[in-house]
């Protein structure tokens, strides 16, 4: 029953990434450890209290990557050799993650966060191959009058480095899990290590029961964490994920799930573990709540373009500190312009999304990316609020404009600008030419995408710190052209 519950939770996460990313206030992702901590620093305290009560039950039921490993191992039906002492390397990995996070190197926590790793696996490996089936299912439901049950699968930009990196990660993890059960949970996962500080002193845990144990060792061969020592009659509670396979396999009732009784919480070692875990929790809290000190920056030349972060991310500092590159926002973007980065944000922002105006532009009333983000890296905005947020600034190079170069009427940029930051003014005779008002420029990229000139007469450069434009009168609802059509005017 425990495994079926965990499997149901994993399937719900799978369905969310495939069908429902972009929903307002996603409940499932907010239950994950790293997203909850990044959105609210008190999440670390809640996880610690949960581990003091029920150990690493979170890993057993709520972590989809842990369930994936266990499902692979169960499918292989391979018994393990027995007790293997835990590696101290896991503590160094947790320290590295905390130090990297405090230094603003979000790539390290992003690569090791189990929720983000699972999300990248679904969006990069499964969703593209299932996109046709998703669209057909959505169309079938819509033909029956059921709208919004499943979102159509928009195109996801193909980033070779991310795709092959994700494929390699899951291939290695699958082969490793076939042989070792839940190896990522046991030796690499920073969430599991953090919970382990408190779970050794938990009230609810697996314990040897009296003299009922016959020493057969069967429990050790079915433990995916290899944390049961029959010789010493002990279970490493800081590694145990409460999968209950040992209790199910024990024929003599030598193991039981029970409350209290070990006295570990009163020992010096237990107190040291709790103290270390508390310091880790305080470190996480400091990391997620420290003031953003991003300095406003601008491109130094026409040829230089700063990357654009999604509306609601506030600043480069806030975005880089909280984004775990789970790619939920990439899936949710209806225009298909969010893609994982490989170099735009530097090595510290590996795979964090960036807006690509070569594919389309940010839709004027759309807030899907903020609605999908579980960490607070992209805050959810109301449409009216989002329509005043400036995420970049357009730059107009008049000599490239086809009105000036060829004496031909155009105006595509003005037609698509939702705030009329690009407006047409008299030029020669009956011709008009664009003029840019940066005070009302959102940086949405509609002008850059629509511009037919080559090289572009207008480009958009991102802002390190987002601003606000002057309120625009007139009630313009913004561009209505499809974001991916071949010729936008």
Image (spheres, helix red, strand yellow):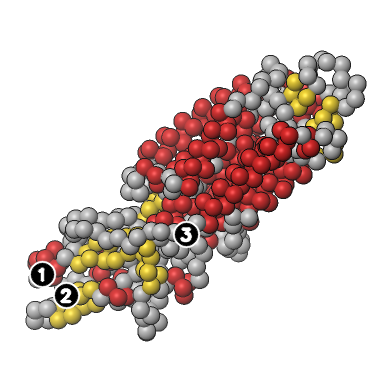
- Of residues 95 and 50, which is closer to you in this image? 95
Q: For the residue labelled by badge 3, is the local secondary structure a helix, a strand or a loop?
A: loop
Residue at 77% across / 38% down in the picture? Answer: 265
Asked if disc 3 and disc 1 are in contact, CB closer than 8 Å, the reply is: no
From this viewpoint, is residue 380 visible?
A: yes
Image height check: is 394 above or below 93? below
Secondary structure under the numbered disc 1 in the rendered image: helix
* Mark drawn on residue 291: 3
Q: Residue 228 location, x and y as percent?
A: 74, 24
Q: Dot 1 corresponds to which residue?
A: 404
Which is in the foreground here, disc 2 or disc 3? 3
Cα separation, mark 1 vs mark 2, equals 8 Å
| Up-down relation of residue 380 to residue 234 (above or below) | below
Label whose residue precedes the other's in the sequence (1 or 2): 1
249 sits to left or right of 298: right
Q: Residues within 10 Å of mark 3 (few under 14, many from 20)?
A: few
Residue in the picture at 16% in, 75% down: 433
């Amino acid at each position: 029953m425990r495994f079926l519950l965990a499997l149901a939770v994993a399937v719900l996460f799978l369905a969310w990434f495939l069908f429902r990313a972009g929903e307002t206030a996603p409940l499932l992702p907010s239950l994950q450890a790293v997203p909850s901590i990044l959105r609210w620093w008190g999440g670390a305290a809640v996880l610690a209290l949960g581990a003091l009560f029920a150990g690493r039950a979170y890993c057993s039921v709520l972590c989809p990557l842990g369930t994936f490993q266990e499902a692979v191992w169960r499918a292989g039906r391979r018994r393990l050799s027995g007790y293997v002492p835990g590696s101290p390397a896991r503590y160094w990995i947790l320290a590295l993650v905390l130090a990297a996070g405090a230094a603003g190197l979000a790539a390290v926590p992003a690569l090791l966060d189990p929720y983000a790793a699972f999300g990248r696996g679904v969006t990069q490996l499964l969703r593209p191959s299932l996109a046709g089936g998703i669209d057909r299912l959505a169309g079938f439901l819509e033909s029956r009058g059921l709208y919004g049950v499943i979102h159509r699968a928009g195109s996801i930009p193909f980033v070779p480095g991310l795709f092959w990196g994700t494929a390699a990660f899951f291939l290695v993890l699958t082969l490793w899990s076939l042989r070792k059960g839940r190896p990522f949970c046991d030796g690499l996962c920073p969430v599991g290590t953090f919970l382990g500080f408190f779970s050794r002193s938990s009230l609810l845990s697996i314990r040897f029961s009296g003299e009922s144990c016959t020493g057969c060792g069967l429990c050790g061969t079915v433990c995916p964490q290899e944390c049961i020592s029959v010789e010493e009659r002990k279970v490493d509670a800081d590694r145990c994920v409460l999968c209950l396979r040992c209790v199910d396999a024990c024929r003599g009732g030598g193991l039981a799930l029970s409350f209290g009784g070990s006295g570990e919480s009163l020992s010096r070692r237990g107190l040291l573990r709790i103290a270390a875990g508390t310091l880790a929790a305080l470190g996480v809290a400091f990391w997620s709540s420290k003031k953003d000190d991003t300095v406003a920056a601008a491109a130094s030349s026409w040829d230089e373009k700063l990357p654009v972060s999604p509306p609601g991310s506030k600043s480069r500092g806030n975005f880089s500190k909280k984004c775990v590159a789970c790619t939920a926002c990439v899936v949710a973007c209806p225009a298909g312009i969010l893609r994982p980065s490989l170099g735009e944000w530097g090595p510290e922002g590996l795979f964090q999304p960036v807006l690509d105006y070569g594919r389309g532009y940010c839709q004027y009333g759309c807030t899907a990316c903020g609605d999908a983000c579980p960490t607070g890296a992209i805050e959810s905005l109301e449409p009216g609020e989002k329509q005043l947020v400036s995420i970049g600034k357009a730059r107009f190079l008049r000599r490239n404009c086809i009105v000036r170069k060829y004496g031909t009427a155009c105006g595509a940029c003005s037609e698509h600008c939702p705030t009329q930051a690009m407006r047409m003014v008299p030029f020669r005779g009956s011709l008009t030419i664009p003029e840019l008002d940066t005070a009302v420029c959102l940086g949405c990229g509609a002008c850059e995408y629509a511009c037919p000139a080559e090289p572009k007469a207008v480009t958009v450069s991102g802002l390190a710190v987002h601003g606000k434009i002057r309120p625009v009168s007139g009630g313009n609802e913004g561009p209505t052209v499809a974001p991916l059509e071949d010729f936008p005017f």
